[in-house]
Image: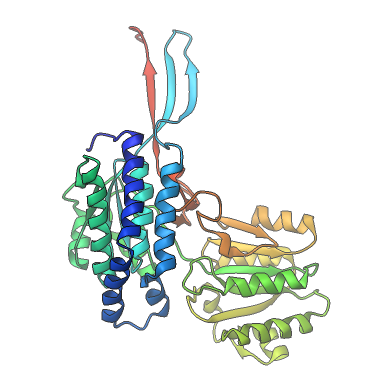
């Protein structure tokens, strides 16, 4: 296990990384072009996540700079207690040790996730997808340069150039100590990691997010929130399902406006039996589609009888990620928010805000749909475990 680096040292490495990203900006973008040209798949969301342009580099720089400005998440006293025998007891946050991050296609994860894990005092093992290998190796070389220039071992950030078989073997019998695994990617990747891992896994699960338009909704807010929910189809916080209260006044007029706005944005609209009959859109083929995360220019609209029915439906079909209610009725909003079982619940706002940076964490390692050990965006302050510190002067029990 690497000895914990001082907070000054960790921050200095992060700030140097920010400078190197700026300095090597055009080289990173040029190397990423090779990865884009070599990508032969037809997954548009994968391609979108693979691409590095100026704005992505800006985000990478912002993320490490912001991390350097944040308080040390390690050694924070969570609880203290003075025993009657005179012992002083503290419970403090502690780093995990070694964190393995397995991810697909996103070179920005090589900066942001590694930065969060490093700032939390952890050694990082990065296992990126083959589609982003050139981009990732370039970024890891910058991490190594930042570490070396600060007189620190490059062991703190290690890239695992493994194929699927080697990755499976490593998960089942790690050749070095691993304390926590964070998979970031699609359902297949997450299932693969959960099946083979022999240490704790934080699951960054699927989206399949719902917006419920209550009968007392402000229709302009509803339209804005739904359209915004489809503004980035590759995001896990995108909206896939819309439930419309059948008691909504001028319901058909609202649905027609919504459908025409979605179609203007080139989004394919499906409807349940009622919506498809009344509004002339394609009907769903099977109820199983309610479980599906689309990651595509596609949305499903259904009618629902009440807030309680909406809660039941969301709890059955959603990925446990994000859901939103659009209403001017505070009591209905409260009922919905307290009873919908998703990591983030919204009232009159877009699910696209489920993101560490947007929710005040400065960045995120992943968005957990598990309930242990942290739910929703996992920021710097969540990537720690804890430890008991007990000070005595000879006490025995």
For the residue pair 179 and 32, the one nearer the viewer reads as 32
In the image, 229 versus 214, the foreground residue is 229
Indicate the position of residue 258 as horizontal and vertical percent values: 69, 81
Quadrant in the picture for the C terminus: top left
Q: Please provide percent x and percent y for residue 262.
A: 63, 83
Q: Quadrant of the N terminus?
A: top left
- The reply to whether residue 355 is visible in this rendering is yes
Q: Position of residue 248 (x, y in %)?
A: 80, 74
Instruction: Report whether residue 129 is seen.
Output: no
Quadrant housing residue 109:
bottom left
- Please give left or right for residue 327 compared with residue 6 in the image: right
Residue 78 x, y percent position in the rendering: 48, 30
Q: Quadrant of residue 3?
A: top left
Q: Nearer the viewer, residue 301 or 238?
A: 238
Tag count: 0
Residue pictured at 35% horizontal, 58% vertical: 22
């Amino acid at each position: 296990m690497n000895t914990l680096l001082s907070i000054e040292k960790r921050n200095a490495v992060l700030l140097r990384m920010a400078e190197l990203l700026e300095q090597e900006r055009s080289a990173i973008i040029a190397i990423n072009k090779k990865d884009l040209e070599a990508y032969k798949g037809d997954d548009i969301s994968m391609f979108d996540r693979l691409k590095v342009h100026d704005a992505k580099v800006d985000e990478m720089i912002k993320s490490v700079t912001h991390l350097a400005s944040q308080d040390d998440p390690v050694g924070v006293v969570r609880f203290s207690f003075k025993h009657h025998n005179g012992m002083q007891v503290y419970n403090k946050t502690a780093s995990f040790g070694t964190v393995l991050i397995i991810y697909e296609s996103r070179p920005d994860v090589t900066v942001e996730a590694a930065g969060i894990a490093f700032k939390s005092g952890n050694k990082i093992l990065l296992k990126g997808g083959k589609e982003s290998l050139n981009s990732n190796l370039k970024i890891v070389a910058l991490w190594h340069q930042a570490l070396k220039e600060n007189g620190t071992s490059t062991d703190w950030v290690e890239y695992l150039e493994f194929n699927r078989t080697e990755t499976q073997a490593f998960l089942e019998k790690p050749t070095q100590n691993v304390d926590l695994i964070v998979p970031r990617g699609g359902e297949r990747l997450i299932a693969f990691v959960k099946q083979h891992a022999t240490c704790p896994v934080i699951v960054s699960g699927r989206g399949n997010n719902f917006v419920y338009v209550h009968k007392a909704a402000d229709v302009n807010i509803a339209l804005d929130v739904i359209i915004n929910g489809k503004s980035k189809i590759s995001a896990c916080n995108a909206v896939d399902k819309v439930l419309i209260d059948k008691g909504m006044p001028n319901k058909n007029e609202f649905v027609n406006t919504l459908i025409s706005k979605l179609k203007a944005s080139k989004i394919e609209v499906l409807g349940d039996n009622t919506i498809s009959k009344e509004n002339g859109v394609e009907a769903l083929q099977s109820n199983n589609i309610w479980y599906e995360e689309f990651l595509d220019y596609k949305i499903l609209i259904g009618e629902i009888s009440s807030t309680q029915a909406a809660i039941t439906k969301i709890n059955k079909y959603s990925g446990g990620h994000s859901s939103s209610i659009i209403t001017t009725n505070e009591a209905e909003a409260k009922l919905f928010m307290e009873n919908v079982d998703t990591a983030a619940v919204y009232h009159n706002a877009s699910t696209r805000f489920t993101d560490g940076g947007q929710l005040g964490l400065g960045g995120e390692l992943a968005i957990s749909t598990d309930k242990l050990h942290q739910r929703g965006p996992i920021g710097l302050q969540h990537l720690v475990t804890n430890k008991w510190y007990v000070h005595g002067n000879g006490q025995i029990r």
